[in-house]
Amino acid sequence: MKKNSAMLIAFVSPAAIFFILIFLYPILRTLLMSFFRIEGVTDGLAKWQFVGFSNYGKLLNTTLFRISMWNLFRIWLFGGMIVLSLALLFAVIITSGIRGRSFFRAMIYLPNIVSAVALATMWLQYVYSPKFGLLKSFFTLLHLPKLASIQWLSNDHKFMALLIAYCFGMVGYHMLIFSSGIERISSDYFEAATLDGANKIQQFQHITLPLLKGMFHTNITMWSVSSVGFFVWSQLFSTVTADTQTITPMVYMYMQIFGAGNSVTERNAGIGAAVGVLLSICVVIIFTICNKLLQDKELEF
């Protein structure tokens, strides 16, 4: 028994040590930092000034942070509706037995293997360009001058342009998750439904959707995590750090920790840590709600 215990400890210890150092310690340190005023993120404990919940109070009373949370909510809600709807549609089409489905699956997923910087540059210079952009040329060809003259990178349209470009790059990833769920569903269900007189829409409504609850849970959770970490696209679509049309909490966190942007007069890594804690709480809340609403324990494949 002692030999087995020693062997168990020997195998478990490396994983436990890595988990503590890489995951648990940063989480606990960030949570602790959120209650202190810290000028540099690498400052020792001796330089930390305890301020309690004042960092959270400052965040909630800061207009720029509230704007960044509102932008994040719009990205999560409207972007999520667009991405998950298109991902589900493409997944259903690809798993329906069409010819060349491997090719179409690869093409839809292709933007996910392209660097976000390269993808955003393509949208900025070749799609939204007011001189020779794809949208301008397309609407000009259709003789729609009003649509062709839209300045997509102006303050009035910049957020929508950012959202569309970001959604374009995320559809393929979530499509694969839906596809894996649809392929797990036995064809016997659809054959039985066909014999009972159910059409394709009824089969999708009463068979496919209920059996995809687990995939919806996974996709919503993964979309929430990726939305919370929204940073690179915001920076690339904005010429200034504190652009109210594109700023997100991650950008605001960057500003507070490294003192970037004209609106930040001092660095405070404690406020940056508080932003991280609030974003983590948001993800946990969404995950908990999904667990309550998207339970599939009573469903069988």
Image (spheres, rainbow, N blue to C red):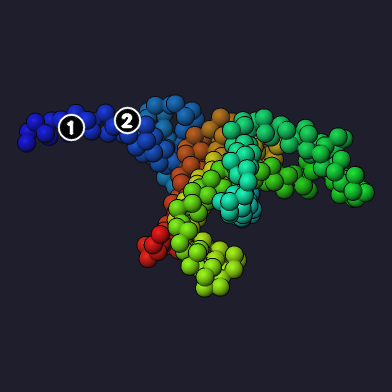
Q: Which of 132 and 231 is in front in this view?
A: 132
Q: Label 1: few (<14), some or many (≥20) within 10 Å?
A: few
Residue 28's label in the rendered image is none
Name the residue at 58% across, 51% down: 97
Name the residue at 65% across, 30% down: 117
Name the residue at 90% across, 44% down: 141
In this view, 146 is above or below 260: below
**Quarter of the figure with the C terminus:** bottom left
Residue 9's label in the rendered image is 1
Question: Can you name the residue that lies furthest to the bottom here?
Answer: 196
Measured from the top left, where is residue 187 in percent x and y? 48, 58
Measured from the top left, where is residue 185 in percent x and y? 46, 57
Query: Of the residues shown, which amino acid type is indicated by label 1?
Result: Ile
* Residue that mark 2 sits on: 18
Task: Measure how far apart labels 2 and 1 are at the Cα level.
Answer: 14 Å
Q: Is mark 2 on a helix, strand or loop?
A: helix
Measured from the top left, where is residue 271 in percent x and y? 50, 40
Name the residue at 40% across, 41% down: 31
Q: Which of 200 and 250 is in front in this view?
A: 200
Q: On the picture, is 133 further left or further right than 199?
A: right
Q: Which of 87 and 226 is in front in this view?
A: 87
In this view, 13 is above or below 199: above
Q: On the picture, is 78 further left or further right than 130?
A: left
**Quarter of the figure with the N terminus:** top left
Q: Which of the marked residues, 2 or 1, is nearer the chain's N terminus?
A: 1
